[in-house]
Image (cartoon, rainbow, N blue to C red):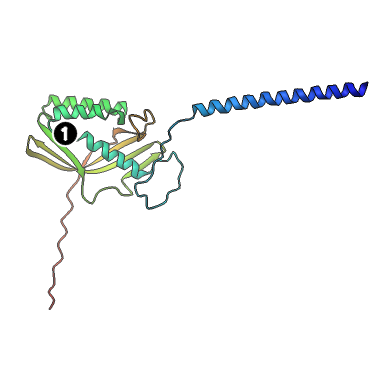
Amino acid sequence: MSRFRHAVKGRDQHIFTLRAACVVLLLLLVTAMGGWMRAPEKLTIHNPPDLRKGSTRPWWEIPPPTVYGFTYYIFQQLNAWPKNGRVDYPARIQSLSAYLTPQCKAFLEEDSKVRGEKNELTDRVRVVYEIPGRGYSGNSVKVIDRDNWVVKLDLVADEYYLTEPVKRAMVRYPLKVVRWDGDSESNPFGLALDCYEGIPQRLSAAPEQPKPERKGMF
């Protein structure tokens, strides 16, 4: 009789162990499903512009060429006033607000207001573009840390009053860029312009290289 009692007790213990294991597995399954549901649907991977070369790096690292390309594109768009700076400049700030930090947007809005009061924007047409031969280089982007950079843009700034040219300057713009993982729908780059790191510096034109003399056949 004792043998049967021990067999029944052992069976009951085994059933209890199986039930406990099922409960643990159920809890692990619920935890895994919760983590899967909270996982991001999209993951932004930044590839260097030159795809002819391989690249091995952490997924969260943004290559300096990507940071430079983003900065140049946004800054050029901010300074593209095709008809009238009084209208175009504020409109550009508003349309590009997803790519600007709140502090930078406020700074640019104040700059637009002050320049408008001084009558520096009415009927002004403006465009900026890279100085030939002074595009991206190894010194163009300074990596502060994983989420912060300083980008140097060497640009030509042309301004016109209506159709009359009034200004041409070659300027180095030091600009701050930060990681900005806010709204991937409005800002797929995951970066934002944080305005100036310092005072823009006027550059001098590079001296023209003398043309080589052609020598005759004899």
- In this view, the residue in front, 3 or 164, is 3
Residue for point 20% across, 43% down: 129
Q: Position of residue 198 (x, y in %)?
A: 27, 36
Closer-to-camera residue (150/89)? 89
Q: Residue at x 10, y 27 (%)?
A: 119
Residue farthest toward the left in the current orientation of the protein? 164
> Residue lying furthest bottom in this view?
218
In the rendered view, would you say 170 is above or below 39?
below
Q: Nearer the viewer, residue 10 or 155?
A: 10
Three-letter code for the amino acid on which mark 1 is drawn: Trp
**Is residue 199 something one can see in this rendering?**
no
* Residue 79 lies in quadrant: top left
Q: Would you say 199 lies left or right of 8 here?
A: left
Could you tell me which quadrant the N terminus lies in?
top right
Question: How many numbered marks, from 0 up?
Answer: 1
Q: Position of residue 207 (x, y in %)?
A: 16, 55
For the C terminus, the quadrant is bottom left
- Disc 1: CA contacts within 10 A as few (<14), some (14-19) or many (>=20): many
Question: Residue shown at 41%/36% (left/top)?
Answer: 44
* Res 147 visible: yes
Residue 158: x percent and y percent? 14, 40
> What element does badge 1 sit on?
loop
According to the picture, the residue beneath numbered tag 1 turns out to be: 81
